[in-house]
Image (tube, coloured by chain):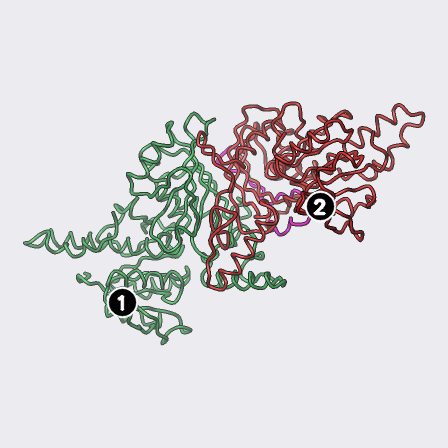
Chain colours: A green, B red
Amino acid sequence: MPTSVPRIGIVGARGLVGSEALSILAQRGHPAKSVVGFGSSRSAGSRIDYGPTPIEIQHIDTIADHGLDYTILCADASVAHQVAELLQHQPATIIDNSSAFRMNPRVPLVVPEINADQLTEQSKLIANPNCSTIMMVRALDPLHREIGIRNITVTTYQAVSGAGRAGVDELHAQTHSHLNGIDQAPSLFPAGCAFNVFEHESLIDPATGFNGEETKMINETRRIWGIADLPVLPTCVRVPVERAHAQSIVADLQEPTTESLLREILSSYAIRTLEPGETLTPLDAAGGDDVIVGRIRVDPSSGGRRVLLWVCCDQIRKGAALNAIQILDQLKFKRCSSRAKKSTRPGKACAEEQNRKVLA
Amino acid sequence: MPTSVPRIGIVGARGLVGSEALSILAQRGHPAKSVVGFGSSRSAGSRIDYGPTPIEIQHIDTIADHGLDYTILCADASVAHQVAELLQHQPATIIDNSSAFRMNPRVPLVVPEINADQLTEQSKLIANPNCSTIMMVRALDPLHREIGIRNITVTTYQAVSGAGRAGVDELHAQTHSHLNGIDQAPSLFPAGCAFNVFEHESLIDPATGFNGEETKMINETRRIWGIADLPVLPTCVRVPVERAHAQSIVADLQEPTTESLLREILSSYAIRTLEPGETLTPLDAAGGDDVIVGRIRVDPSSGGRRVLLWVCCDQIRKGAALNAIQILDQLKFKRCSSRAKKSTRPGKACAEEQNRKVLA
């Protein structure tokens, strides 16, 4: 059982998502002695800053030796499988950012504002959805609950940092070269990313024509809402943006609505909305915690049933690191509540953790 | 009546569209002595290259004195109104790239591959549609004719050069600054354009929530196809791309279709399509004449009636300058055919012009 200050492991601590998770924990004052960063042989032994304190990266192979209560995996699917095996006889709860377990029916796939009810104090492995899925379902969930959604068409503008630091490096290098009159061949991406846009680099399924990112959005959205046949039509595109994704979403609703009703519903679910005429860009969302909705429109030819939203979100924070830590908050709270119920002084035990949880 | 080598005036000859029109005419070998470039007091008197030949920009106020057969307007709506007035008693036919006359029911709005039949030998003023409209209707027209279109949802990735040379200059300056750690305030655009995307800068209509670019796409598409209530749902977005637009188009068709049938139909209308798995980006379209269609998909949950296309096009060429010159070709051909019918040797008179026309 976790103590009141749990020991948290961050796997992939040097990556974009891992270092963001460390930064969120440090900002909240989670003590350095209760955090362990893990990496491959390449980074093990090196030091990274945790707030003002340097911490040493531990080798992933030693993860079972650190007495972890929670492990947040910020690495790829193969590392996730490896860590799950290493920790299978340990008490540590795993929250995985990779795609390894997202479609496993025994593993809850959680966006805390939407389906935290799938977490129990016994949950040992939880999957974090794909960043594009998280921001879309977070923006649409209020409409799904209050009005009902019949189908979704979404076109994305995805930052190159979705492909990690290497994506940002490729963007910077190619842009710099192009401005100096030289065009570099692409390395990480299937096409030049300087002053260009291109379909998401994940593999296209020849059977459907959808790429991997699009398939994730379809399957994960259906799973999170529990609607196996919900029509979801994504087109996922990379744009030369460093950080934060944008989405142009069109959804058909079960009932007619109005722009002001949509705004009211979104606000009542703590979604930040912009006033008509205010400009929203990925740069506005970068570095923040919010899924922000701008340009709320209702198709005049749809009898009020088709709505258009422009959504921006920092995909490294709410799309990955922050969502994982919010899952951890929920688990801590559930476990703390459970202990409190068994204690003679219910209420007091959870006060500290309740104060720390970030969910509205 | 135009002679066999007509005198062509290009208004806004120093602008991106005007200089592209000159470049197309020069590439085709249209003689320099039959081309006149016009500009405002700022550019009048300066010289620009027409192929190997420098030509001197004339002041727009003198346009009625040049014995023009055709005038291609590559300037804004106010200049278009001004030139139309200056030329109202002249024989010159005007082809206007601005929005000035696009919704005027007495002025044909023409994409030659679609509705050249609206041109007559008497046409004196013809409007060129907006670049985003041209590329979308050109890509969809084969499906509209062969299957029928019930509605269109489109999300755009529009190059900054749609806002002219100043747009490209702002992108370059802001990008250069950002790479050097300085963020410049936007000047032309409503938000920073370096490593960012933002809604199209045209004014939002408070009644509908659609911006000017989106409203053009709706109204012009309906007018070109003659379907006054066709549902068209655009979301127009600028991306940090120098040249060529991309569009993610979703259309509901009247009848079920398949990916291979779509490919066959598009090819039969001389639309270049990519094979499954081939990557298509705006960079691939830049500098070319084609509207190119990549990623042809059919929504599996739609019974074959909802299709998705990814379309790229050089918006300065087919979206503006080239489309205007193709209109000019059609007018020349119609007039030439008409003269030929009256001549004793029909057929021969038009041979040269037939050889020159660029339409398939």
As rendered, which of A141 and A174 lies closer to the eye?
A174
| Coordinates of residue A91 in the picture (x, y in percent) | 24, 62
Residue kind at label 2, given as amino acid type: Ala
SS assignment at label 1: strand
| Coordinates of residue A259 in the picture (x, y in percent) | 38, 32
Residue kind at label 1, given as amino acid type: Val
In the rendered view, would you say B296 is above or below B124?
Answer: below
SS assignment at label 2: loop
As rendered, which of B83 and A125 lies closer to the eye?
B83
Chain name for mark 1? A
Range of magenta residues: B282-304
User: Residue at label 1?
Assistant: A35
**Residue B112 sits in which quadrant?**
top right
Chain name for mark 2? B
User: Residue at label 2?
Assistant: B44
Q: In which quarter of the image is the C terminus of chain B?
A: top right
Same chain check for tags 2 and 1: no
